[in-house]
Image: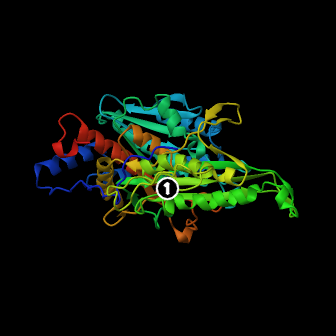
Amino acid sequence: MPPPPPQLESARARLPVRRLTREPLTTMLARSLCCALLALLPALSTAGGAEPFLQAAQEIAPWIVEVRRQLHRIPETRFNEVKTSAAIRARLDELGIAYRHPFAITGVVATLGSGSPVVALRADFDALPMHEDVDLPFKSEHPGRMHACGHDSHAAMLLGAGKILKRLEADGKLRGTVKLMFQPGEEGGSGAKKMLDEGALAGVDVIFGIHTTADFSGPLPTGTITIADGPVMAGTGMFDAVITGKGGHGAIPHQTVDPVVAASAIIMALQTLVSRNTVPTEAAVVSVTKIHAGDANNVIPSAVEIGGTYRALSPDVFSWLQGAIKEKVQVRGAAPRPAAPDDRACPQRLLPSRAQNVAAAYGCTATVDFDDGKELYTDLGELWITEVTPPLVNNATVAAFARGVADEIFGPGNVLQQPPCMAGEDFAFLTQAIPGAFAWVGHKNVEKDCAAANHNVLFQVDEDSIPYGAAMHAAFAVNWLNAHNAGASPQHSEL
């Protein structure tokens, strides 16, 4: 029996939001901040904390879009991104930005500036095993492969930010170090964890990442962004179970040990993990999404295979779910539920001492397999080990800082607060190790047919959104370095 998880909050208190305030220009602080930022981009005349970065990104938008279209033509799946990685490195060479390669087989880490603080900006660049149904002049040239999640745009945004930051570095106006992390294998490969384990982010103080979408947990039109405090996306895991009995003719079930009935009982038992075993205010999902139980209508199979996914926003609930799923398959009765702050409101139940194995109750046996620790190989024969993705949780202070930067770039009313979603993202490994924040940049534009969901064969990105991402990356890095450099004002220096 797995031990119950640590105590959970019955209702997660929203973390306080600390926004960067715009001081009156008559004050010494605002005047010096404005002058510093204008000095960083001397060719620009736009006043304000981060607005010059958007203008800079829009000026190089044709180059950024060209990069995005180049990458869009050559989609490659997790850890097979050989052409994509080479294309990114060629662009870094073009910009004169130093880099290290490889990390996690095809990953790249570029470096600008020197000294402390150290800010990392991350973009993934793998594609999905899907056929692209959108007829674009730059559509996928690789059959059965498609950039259906915008990772080509992510890499282009980061290269655009690199182009802006390189200009600042050349002028001696980068007050610290910026690392550009180009990551492979986000789609089910936990590439972020692999790059972290290989030391790609050694010495980094803070990390920021961007994803593009038309709809997060609500519509995100082009020119909008959402940056949440606390949980952003769920921890995600997969499971498969095999229930084995004794097959036979459907007309004589008494001579068989029917695994279909046992599997049905297990599936029903799994439904109670969320509805009756987790605190109602804690978001969690357990879904059985596949079942295979034979091929003939008059034959009881000897085995049944079921599989599904489990997800949670709380790290405690997520870690508990895996053990609870195994117990539900193997043990009849209620799994030990997470404790609530008030045990009177949600008393913890232990398994009865006489609890019986569900499969054994029907004369069957059962095994459960999870998706972590499996050894898989890329198309090129490279070994990688699967990982379960934990919940993605933003650091509240970093998220508040990012929203302050976003206020300047996206404008009043366009920095949205949307609730978390139950999809997964391996940026979670990075925020476990380093204070960081993950933002969603909108690209919904119905007039341009840019409204399809991510992972859809009709997925398109409104390219007018891409300069916003490049500007956000660059502005976050520069503002963070300036605020946390030696002599920074106290209100900008705490983490």
- In this orientation, which residue lies closer to the viewer: 56 or 422? 422
Q: Nearer the viewer, residue 233 or 150?
A: 233
Question: Within 10 Å of the Cα at label 1, are there few (<14), some (14-19), or many (20+) other Cα atoms?
Answer: many
Return the x and y of residue 153 as percentages of the image width and height: 53, 51
Q: Position of residue 478 (x, y in %)?
A: 31, 42
Q: Is residue 324 visible?
A: yes
Secondary structure beneath label 1: strand
Residue 279: percent from left, percent from top: 41, 59
Farthest-out residue, left: 27
Can residue 183 be spotted in the picture? no
Above or below, 116 relative to 129: above
Q: Quadrant of residue 167?
A: top left
Looking at the image, the residue that sits furthest to the bottom is 447
In this picture, residue 83 sits left or right of residue 422:
right
**Closer-to-camera residue (140/374):** 374
**Against 108, is 49 above or below?**
below
Residue in the image at 68% along x and 61% along y: 264
Which residue corresponds to mark 1? 212
